[in-house]
Amino acid sequence: MIDRRGFLNSILAPALAEGATRATSMSPPLASPAMPAWPEDDDPDFWDRIRDQFYIPRTESFFNTGTIGAVPRPVLERVIEDMRTLEATVARWDYSENTPNWISGYSPELPLREKLGKLVNVEGPDIALTQNATFGSSFVAHGLSLKSGDEVILTDREHPGAISAWQERAKLDGIVLKLVPIPTPANDPDKLVDLFGQAITSRTRVLAFPHIISSSAVVLPAKRLTELAHQHGCLSLADGAQALGQIPVDLKDIGCDAYFASPHKWLLAPPGNGMFYIRRDQRDKFQTTLCSFAWDDQSDGMYRFMQYGTGNRSLLTGLDAALDFHFRIGPDRVYKRIRSLADRLRAGLQQIPRAKIGSPVHPELAGATVCHRVDGLPAAKLESELWTKKWVRVRSQGDLVGVRQSCQIYNNEAEIDATLEIVRNLAAHA
């Protein structure tokens, strides 16, 4: 078994060293060293040291990754170092071809796309780097050729960033939006698929759904929904904002026609990063709706969807560092760890009278996020009590599902138990 301190150093050193390399030579990022062996036992001491790699005060428990993830120290430090370097060398920027890019929005960024592609099992040219999942939602809603009366199926639990573009398209062109009602809690995968199937008609052109529902933490059966869509000749479009980094995402296995995500949540990248994927055999169905100089570039798959104009290259450097951080811990280890914390929370809540779980407990539909409430207590009050009593930060999702508690690698068993203690006391007196 390797020394844990040495293992953690192996996580942090490459990211910092890469930042130093950029500062001195301004060369493209170096290839990451080989992944070190993992310790034989995932003991709390290891995860406690991982916790030190975040700026969150030890007195506070941050369970709101579903809104935004906390950026690891080496990731933020690399972003800051890159920005300082760019500002110090602004007079020496070389704008000729085949030189390092100093601003984003004008370069294919293929090495970074390749690295991100490894996480979701597609090739780099299959991915566009955007600024968040909302970009992808707007690209698919406005880029498809749809006419008045064409139907698009969504859920009644869509995030505003995912449904707003479809609502605008309905207003502009008369397409019909049909919302599938998602049960609360949802614990039957077959029933969920049937609900989508019942909504499909001969006018349906698109089946769009969140891979994980933001407000109720339901992990929808993405592969089965994609198969359902294709059986009826429809496109399958998935919102992966809550999925990327929380659960394994294999886009080839899912088979969906388009997928978009926000790495600033569960992948712990700086805000301002997004991912957009279109299956190769479906790309010609999506038109570019945000245009700059390479808006019609067909030579590199998804590059035409990266034409958002001048941007902050250092944020892409942060995404690169976040991927390094994720890969060096190990994606499967991350998924196992955060799922185990959520399972601990679910199990504890089930033992508390009057505590109710609004998110799934079915293993196929549950992830690392738990929504819960206390009978007779408004969700906003539960959110407030958790913060004021133990500095536990969750987010209310309304009285139907309760508060949303997202478990991440910077959380631990003691924080879960503190949550359960407060809920137990509130349930006894509510």
Image (cartoon, helix red, strand yellow):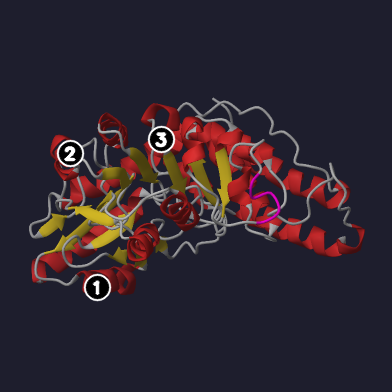
In the image, 270 versus 405, the foreground residue is 270
* Rendered location of residue 349, percent (x, y): 17, 52
In the depicted structure, whether residue 52 falls above or below residue 44: below
Residue 403, placed above or below residue 406: below
Magenta stretch contains residue 158:
no
Q: Helix or strand or loop: what does disc 3 sit on?
A: loop
Query: Judging from the image, what secondary structure is the residue with disc 1 in?
Result: helix
Residue at the spot of label 1:
380
The mark that comes first in sequence, 3 or 1, is 3
Q: Amino acid at mark 3?
A: Pro
Q: Residue at x 21, y 47 (%)?
A: 346
Position of residue 138 in the picture relative to residue 22 (left or right)? left
Q: CA distance from mark 3 to mark 2?
A: 25 Å
Q: Position of residue 182 (x, y in %)?
A: 18, 51
- Which amino acid type corresponds to the residue marked 2 in the rendered image? Gly
Instruction: Decide: is 416 above or below 207.
Output: below
> Where does label 2 land, which residue?
197
Amino acid type, mark 1: Ala
